[in-house]
Image (spheres, rainbow, N blue to C red):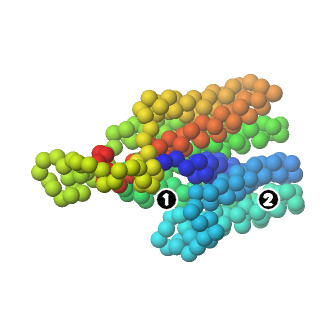
Amino acid sequence: MHPAYSVIFFTTATGAGYGLLAALGLLAALGLIPPDFWLGLVSLGIALGLIAGGLLSSTAHLGRPERAWRAFSQWRTSWLSREGVAAVITFVPALLFALGWIVFSRTDGWVAMSGLAAAIGSTITVLSTSMIYYSLKPIPQWNSAFTVPGFLLLSWSSGAVLLNAVQHAFGMPSQFWLIAGIVLTLLAWGWKWATWRQNDQVRLPASLNSATGLSAGKVSSVEWPHTEENYLLKEMGFRVARAHRIKLRTIVQTTAFSGPATLLMIALFAGGPVAVVACLLATVAQMLGLLVERWLFFADAKHTVILYYGRD
């Protein structure tokens, strides 16, 4: 599939934003976060800013952005519509959470319940996003048991890394969240490696033989149905060279997973200004690495329609 930059930014930014919002909401529900004005303003500002920016960027990929609102009406059958509905609904408790924390200096009572609701809504929204891709049966790399857990793990790990950066910047480090960030990042790394291994072995769900109904012999395409590339070939038949794929996967493993995990380990044992710098570097590195990972997520996907053009 052709990687669309707007969708790459959308899935990366909203994943991290919802992950951070879920972590903050969970902390509030457990009574483990202080009602500090600046901590609330910065942490929720980052979370909601990433979510809003990502959602707005996703409209750039639409042919008619002014009609995007019509997608909400198809929530009974469309995961894209359900994602939009979940995103809008999640903003309600998220804004109440922000109001209580920043304006009323509270993180207990109804504010804590709003945080918990925002955390649940965040998880449902990321789940809905992942189901958009999982539900596409013509693309075996996405219609896989690895897709949904992969989205959730990347969201949680990036949210935990962001949370550690905020906590250390405000002088409120948490050993538990440092360990959680390391564990989630390593789990996401292992899951992504397993996903790549599975995708390298997967075959298209159909072949030229099954598409034509001819079981004997091997059917091959004599010539293309047209003389030049069209929209389908550019969007659905995008290919990335094996050498580039290997290089990009190495970059992802270093910047999105092993690098941040190592930096969080340094923060865990070093403390002080070193821990602050390490957590900030881990956040920057992981966000850049996840942008590359998301590019590969689309570039590695193959749509069954390419059989029409003689590609198997």
Which residue position is annotated with label 1?
132
Q: Residue at x 49, y 59 (%)?
A: 132
The quadrant holding residue 82 is bottom right
Q: Amino acid at mark 2?
A: Ala
Work out whether residue 148 or residue 180 is closer to the camera in this orientation and state it.
148
Q: Is residue 222 shown left or right of residue 263?
A: left
Q: Badge 1: few (under 14), some or many (20 or more) residues near its Cα, within 10 Å?
A: some
Residue furthest out toward the left = 216
Judged by depth in the image, the label closer to the viewer, 1 or 2, is 1
Quadrant of the rendered image containing residue 89? bottom right
Q: Which mark is residue 156?
A: none
Instruction: Say if residue 78 shows up in the picture.
Output: yes
Residue sitting nearer the eye, 182 or 33: 182
Coordinates of residue 241 in the picture (x, y in percent): 43, 34
Residue at 81% of width from left, 37% of height from top? Answer: 169
> For the residue carrying disc 2, how many other residues have a C-alpha within 10 Å: few (<14), some (14-19), or many (20+)?
many
Q: Which mark is residue 98?
A: 2
Q: How far apart are the alpha carbons under marks 1 and 2?
A: 29 Å
| x then y, percent, for residue 103 | 88, 60
Estimate the x, y position of residue 87 in percent, counting from the top left: 63, 63
Q: Is 69 displayed left or right of 218 in the figure? A: right
Q: From this view, report whether residue 86 is shown above or below residue 127.
A: below
Q: Secondary structure at mark 1?
A: helix
Residue that appears at 74% across and 24% down: 270
Q: Please name the amino acid that badge 1 sits on.
A: Ile
**Badge 2 element:** helix
Residue drawn 56% across and 75% down? 73
Where's residue 40, x and y in %? 81, 51
